[in-house]
Structure formats: C-alpha cells, structure tokens
Amino acid sequence: MISPQFIHQPKTKLIGSALLLIAALIVVSVSLSMQNTAEATGVTGWDAGRIIDDSVFTNVNTMSVQQIQDFLVSKVPVCDTWGTNGTTSTSRSNYFASMGYPLPIKCLTDYTENGKSAAQIIYDAAQQYQINPQVLIVLLQKEQGLVTDDWPDPTQYKSATGYGCPDTSVCDSQYYGFTNQIINSAKMFRAIINNSPTWYTPYVIGNNYIQYNPSASCGGSVVYIQNRATQALYNYTPYQPNSATLAAGWNTATCGAYGNRNFYLYFTKWFGAATSAATYGYSFVSTELYYDYEYKNKIPDGTAIEPGQKFYAQITIKNTGNQNWYSDNLHLGTSGDGVSQFQSNGWLGGNRPAAMVESTVGQGENATFQFEMQAPTDLGTYNEQFGVLIEGYRWIGGCFSVPITVGSSDPYYSTEVVSFKAYSDSGMTSELSTSNITKYTDSKVYIKAIIKNTGNQTLSGSLTHIATSDPIDRVSLFNDSSWITNSRAAAAQEGDILPQKTGIFTFSITTPSTELARTKEQFGLVIEGQQWLSDNVGSLSIQTNQRPSSSIFANVGVGVNEWLLSNNEQYMLILQGDGNLVLYNKSWKALWASNTVGTGGIRLIMQGDGNLVIYDKNWKPTWNSGTAGKGESSLYMQGDGNLVIYDKNWKPTWNSGTAGK
C-alpha cells in the first residue's frame, strides 16, 4: 500500500510502490513526488496505453555526457555538502551523524563511482542498451528524487532506481550500487523493447488488467498497451493512476499509485512531449503466390490453381504511420471479418490468415505476412480482399485484393521435404545426426525420407526415386543391396504419391571397407526419364573408421587401449591402461574382467600353446586363461557377448561366461 513515509527529518519523501517482474523478482519503485501545491492541476495528455513513444524511449542521441551533467547542475546548483541547511544550522548534519552517514554529502552533480561521474554512468548505460538517457534521469527522480535532492543520503544511491526492491521485503543486495542500479534498469528496458523471449513479463501488447494500487481492493481497469516502451514502464511499475490521482496533478489521492504518473509528469516537464500525435496507415507493396511453404517455387502470374490445392501466399505492406507495429498483434484480416473460402488449417482463424513475420516494424519499413491457402472446389476467378489491423484496437487503412483463379491448369511437378533422418538401427528408433555420423567400415545406416507432393500431378511410385546428386547420377560409395541401382537408393514405400499427399522412402547405406575418410553424400528426387524434382532432398556427412577385429589368432596379440569388437558392434574387449582386461557391452557396462588392475599388463597374447596371457613390460605374466597345452587356438569376441577360445577343431577351451548378457 502506498503511503507517505518520513525518510529523515526535516525532509519528507513520498514513497510510491512499483513492481519489476524480472524472473521471479518483484521490485519496488520509489517515487518522490512532493511538489509545490501550485502544481496541483490535473495531468493532461495522459494515455494509460501509450505513456511514451518507442521512438522517444529509445532515442540515445538526446544528451551528451556534458549535457547530462549540465542538466543535473541546473537542478541542484548548490549541494548542501556539509548539511548546514534545514530548520536549524545543524539539523541535516546531525541527522547524518545519527544515521552513521559520512560527510561531506554528495549530490548527483558531483557523485562518482569507480572513477566515473553519475553523468558518465547514465550516458554509458544509455548507449550500451540503446535507451534514452532522459528516461534514466527521470527514473532516478521518480524513484529516489536524486536529480533534485541537494542532500541525498547513501541509501538513495544504494537503490537509486529501486531495482531489486520488492514491496514485501528488503532490497536484494546483489543489485545495490548506483552503477548496478542504472545498468540493470536499462538492461530490463532493452529486454522488453526487444521482446526478449528470455525475459519474463506479464504484460502484452494488447489488453491487460492493471490495478490502480498495490491493494487489489482499490480496483483497476483494462488497459490496451500500444507499444513496447509503455509495456516496459508497466513491467517496472505495474500500476496506473486512477482518475483521482490524475486530477491531483503532483499530489496524492485515495487509492493512488504515482510511479507511472510521475514518470510522465517529470519527462514532459523537463524534456517535452513523451508522445506525438499517433498516425496509422500502410501502403500495399506486393503479393506473391508459391507452390511450397519455403517460398521458393513461385506460381507464375495468371496460373490457375487446382480445386482443393494448397498453396502459399506472401504479402508485403509498408508502414506509413508513425507508430511501431508488433508481431504480437499486427494481423492480416479478411475484409469485413468474413470467413475466407481459401482458409487453411494454418490460419489464426477463419478470418485471420496470419500475424506479421517481423518482430517489430517501424515507420517506413516493410511488414511481411506468410500463410497457407487452400483453393475451394468451385471453379472461377476470386478476388480475396484483405486488410490490416492491430488486433483488439483498430483497423489500419482500407483493403486490397488478391486475385486467384481456380480451375484446370497445365501439369506441374513440385515437392517439399517433410523430413530426412538417419538411424543406426533397422527399426529406425535410434536417430543419428545427418551432419555428423561416425561408423566403422562395412556398417549400415538406415535412412527415412518423407516427401510431400505439392504439385498437381501424381508422382509414379515406379518412376519416382531417391537418387544421388551433386553431381547427379553419381555412383555412391555407400550403395548396398537395398538400392535399386548404384545411384538410385529407393522408391516410395506405398507406391504412387497423390497431389498434396506424402510418400515415405526408406533405404540403407553401407560404409565402404576401404575408404577411411569423411564423405558427404547428397540425395535428390527424380522422375526417371522425365525430370529432376529436387537435387537436395537431404545429405549425410559420414566419417568411416577402420573396424577393429573381432578375433586374434595364435601368436597374435593386442596392446594397451586396443580392443576386439564383435561383428554386431554390441560388445568389446579392451586391455586398459591400468593393466585390466575388461569386456564391455555397448552401454559400457563391464560384463567380465581379468581383475588385474595395477599389475602393469601391457600386452595380451593368444599363445601358440593355446594359452591366453597378459604380460607386463618385463614379459612377466599377470594373468592367463589356464589353457596351455590346448594347441593352436584363436580368441573370438562373439556377438552374443561371450569371449571364447577355440582350438583348431573349433572346440571351445575357455569362455568368459557372458553369453546373452
């Protein structure tokens, strides 16, 4: 609740609550508003939905450092440095002494922090975050009265802009300090101006319920916030003045809140108008129709659209008014709000095709609308009429027509890629990054491509193929038995692909046994004997590495950090650097070990006598399989997870006992 509070004697400060919603932080806005009673006339020109224009709020060129300094000096020509003014000659100095505040007193005109003057700190933050320095000056005044105070105390600088000071608890110390306060305030303002997705605000461009006072019992009303600057001010101080507060001018009123009112009063008193007369308008620039949602395949002018066919419109208009447009609420609408015969599932509604693509469009800039349309079944020439509106606020200008002919047209082929994905398994459950695949030689990768037929002709299932491209028809290093030819990977699974329907193409590739390098393979789509539909359906970047052996034979071994890999790549045997021989599954779970950690083993040898032995650097055995005398044998890392020694007659002489694990 807002109420007068005595900060120190004999100076009285009126505190006005504010709420800064930053993450989960609610911040208080302290508003010094005690003015001469002669200024008690009502507030004129106030608009709760447009307190200040974006162009004014973000005009960083209004003041230099020297101009800021001169302005501060004009408000406090003489600072009561030693606290000698007041009711008695020592009242202010006595107050500072009682509070433990040091003398001399520093006014904003001569305040410095980290070697920078207050004017320089204000200027630097304004430039860094592209906020009008006048806004920051007014913020300092309406929060702590620092601009006109000729004997400010240290607490006013500590929370100079009220940033990090909740209504319900003490200020957050991490935001203390004049520079810290200025920077965080400017940073918050810029985040709202930019509509940053990482900065939470409960306010939107459009209708918002805003209270008259922190006490809900005082009521409130719906305010249509028209611009980002006003949204930022409410994000900082989430209350609006009621009619009594506006009528009171600089003074107080029942259930009053003064933060945003005083911001407006100070700004207009010190720096002139906060807003200009708003104008709204647009001029039509262009309409383009496309076959595809990527807006690459343009439909030639005069081309008829097939009944029921989906196509895509891109409409461009120019902002000829003096107010910014925002994607939050600038919409394309149908003439008279009627439901369009060309509406599609992608529309905002039957009479709202789309919102503006750009986040913000200023005066003289172009706005773009992109949306899907679907032709009706009735043939004929249609003049679809559209207009532009600020949703919930007003229409801008008149309407314009988009002529569309629905009827029989010449055959055309067009496709779009819905998805192109790679998998490590034939069931296609373990997805790989198509731009970074690493496989051993003779390994398989499984591909699934989904292609939409956006043309008006059926794509033949027997003639439409995924094929190598870049260059076209190249023999692929990765072709395997699943391919139609060595340059044709697959046909659609379900045969013919009807217009506006999708087809699924699945195939596998096999990494070569000799090419050990990173290779890019690109695929396109071709109608055999007719035309290429696309030379870039998708691409793969594959690094092929030499496959480790799955076995060692008599008198052959492996060294430290070398391994045996089962042919199905599910199990591996590694002689680790710590001397331990370990069998892992593909999830790196240890299934068996020689338990020789720290023994210095550096080589594993399948001896000619049938014994499998780990030796240290001095050729001292640290472990063996106990199969000496079994004769010439081989060691196999099997696909079932079992490590087995076989003699020359394929009789097992030793195993790890890990089959099926």
Image: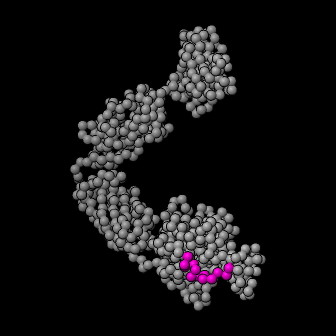
Please tell me whether residue 70 is drawn above or below residue 582 in the rendered image: below
Residue under the point 52% across and 65% down: 128
Q: Position of residue 234 (x, y in %)?
A: 55, 71
Please tell me whether residue 218 is drawn above or below residue 407 in the rendered image: below
Q: Is residue 627 left or right of residue 434?
A: right
Residue 650 is inside the magenta segment: no
Foreground residue among 483 and 435: 435
Foreground residue among 28 and 508: 28
Foreground residue among 269 and 479: 269
Residue under the point 51% across and 85% down: 44
Q: Position of residue 606 (x, y in %)?
A: 58, 16
Please tell me whether residue 609 is drawn above or below residue 514 in the rendered image: above
Looking at the rendering, in which quadrant would you find the C terminus?
top right
Q: Which residues are magenta?
A: 69-81
Residue under the point 38% across and 29% down: 480
The reply to whether residue 334 is visible in this rendering is no
Which residue lies most toward the right here?
98
Q: Position of residue 309 (x, y in %)?
A: 31, 53
Looking at the rendering, in which quadrant would you find the N terminus?
bottom right
Foreground residue among 95 and 554: 95
Q: Is residue 141 left or right of residue 450?
A: right
Residue 655 figure quarter: top right
Which residue lies most toward the front here?
115
Residue 527 figure quarter: top left
Residue under the point 45% across and 31% down: 544
Which residue lies most toward the bottom here?
38
